[in-house]
Amino acid sequence: MDDPSAYYVWEVAGKPVGVRFSYNAMDRILHEAVRGLGLLPRRGAEVGGLLLGTVEPGEILTTRIEDVAPVPIEYAFGRFYAFSENDEKVFRETLRQWEPSVDRTLRAVGFYRTQMQDLLALSQHDLRLFQNHFSDPAQVALLIKPRAMRSSVGGFFIWEQGQLRGESSYLEFPMRLPRRAARPASQPVPEPAPQPPPAQGEVRAEAPVDVPLPSFLSVPPPEEKRKRNWRWWKRAAKDEKAAEPQAAKEPPGRPPQPFWTSWWVQVPILGCLLLVDGLLGFVSARQFHPPPARPAAAPRDPYALSLLVVEYGDNLSLTWDRNAPAIAHAERAVLSIADGDQSQSLDIELPVLQSQGFGVTYHRVTDRVKFRLEVFLKSGRSVSETWELGASSAPSPAEAPRPLP
């Protein structure tokens, strides 16, 4: 029977899948997450890989995670864990090595990824990856929010009747390893064993014993002797004081030097003078040569959303400016995608719209793709911007605000 203290149990009432997450696998993931924080400057980079384990059938499917297999990428799209064509090949090859086999107990039961944003949510890339490679109802996805000085936070995502809820996890949990067992208290020092009696003819050294002084030494001297001794002590003290060696005098040819001639005093004074001289020179230069006036910055277009689309293969990755004035005063947004004769619309919530690093990745079917992002403002108006594949490298100018229908 497995040791319950070796697993973290993730279960949500009424859900079809439960997870037994071994602390050994959690330790490996935390090491990978910390390594990712140092890959790129400032906030680091995301890392990910495969979750390895077994599946136990029953009324509730139990997924056991025993180990992980990290899958490195070349970071073609910045710090995010998104696959290029080469990364996709490496991931498929690693996944093929952990397919179910007779001579192997562990298999791929899902994937994991660290996330730089505070909100644990599956991206479009995660959803497409999960649907293409992890369609088994018992397979799970794990997102981790790494923290350097605090406990990292994780959350599992599961299948429910063929659907995947990716906007948030049902249960987020701190990824903390259990403490090691406390060391046993030190045993008391045993008392020394009694010495056996000496054998016949053996001589054993005894501890020294204080011998009392004779009576003639312990009796105080008479009054006259005490006075005489006192006078003798006073005279001896004067003689000792007079006999103390005199301090060596300096030779008469070297007169005492004033204290300001020492370099301990001269160096700080010289440093202060140089500092004052530099400050005076700077002030005079500022008075006679004032710095040139900086040109005023051009006013920012309040209607621009700054759509940016990166194309790799048949995939289009769409992002926008989170600091745009229209985004800051938005209430919600709708993204319309036209691909040839097909079209669809996606509602984008406000936290996702304003969160840094979030984007939309779309797998195109034809060469005629058009994105249109419409942002609805709190004032009852809306701002939109359009990007079309093949039309130009920059998005079309943003439309002026118009009242909502």
Image: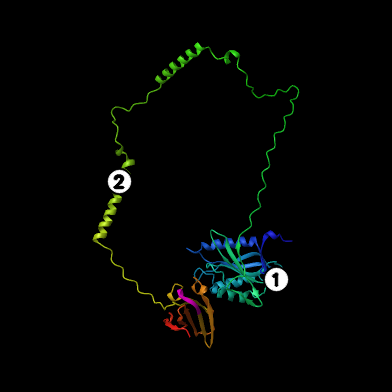
Which quadrant is the N terminus positioned in? Answer: bottom right
Q: Position of residue 204 (x, y in %)?
A: 69, 24
Q: How dense is the environment of label 1, judged by Cα within 10 Å: few (below 14), some, or many (20 and up)?
A: some
Q: Position of residue 199 (x, y in %)?
A: 75, 25
Mark 2 touches mark 1? (CB < 8 Å): no
Residue furthest toward the bottom? Answer: 341
Coloring applied to the structure: rainbow
Question: Do we see residue 71 in this rendering?
Answer: no
Residue found 72% across the figure and 33% down from its top: 193
Q: Secondary structure at mark 1?
A: strand
Q: Position of residue 342 (x, y in %)?
A: 54, 87
Residue 53's label in the rendered image is none
Question: Do we see residue 379 in this rendering?
Answer: yes
Give above or below for 307 relative to 256: below
Q: Secondary structure at mark 2?
A: helix
Q: How dense is the environment of label 2, judged by Cα within 10 Å: few (below 14), some, or many (20 and up)?
A: few
User: Left or right of 296: which side holds 80?
Assistant: right
- In the image, the segment drawn in magenta is 327-333
Return the residue nearer the eye: 5 or 129.
5
The mark tally for this picture is 2
Q: Amino acid at mark 2?
A: Leu
Return the residue nearer the eye: 226 or 100.
226
User: Left or right of 149: which side holds 66?
Assistant: right
**Is 332 inside the magenta-drawn segment?**
yes
Residue 270's label in the rendered image is 2
Q: Position of residue 345 (x, y in %)?
A: 53, 82
Q: Name the residue that disc number 1 marks.
A: 61
Separation of marks 2 and 1 at Cα, in angstroms: 80 Å
**Is 176 inside the magenta-drawn segment?**
no
Q: Amino acid at mark 1?
A: Leu
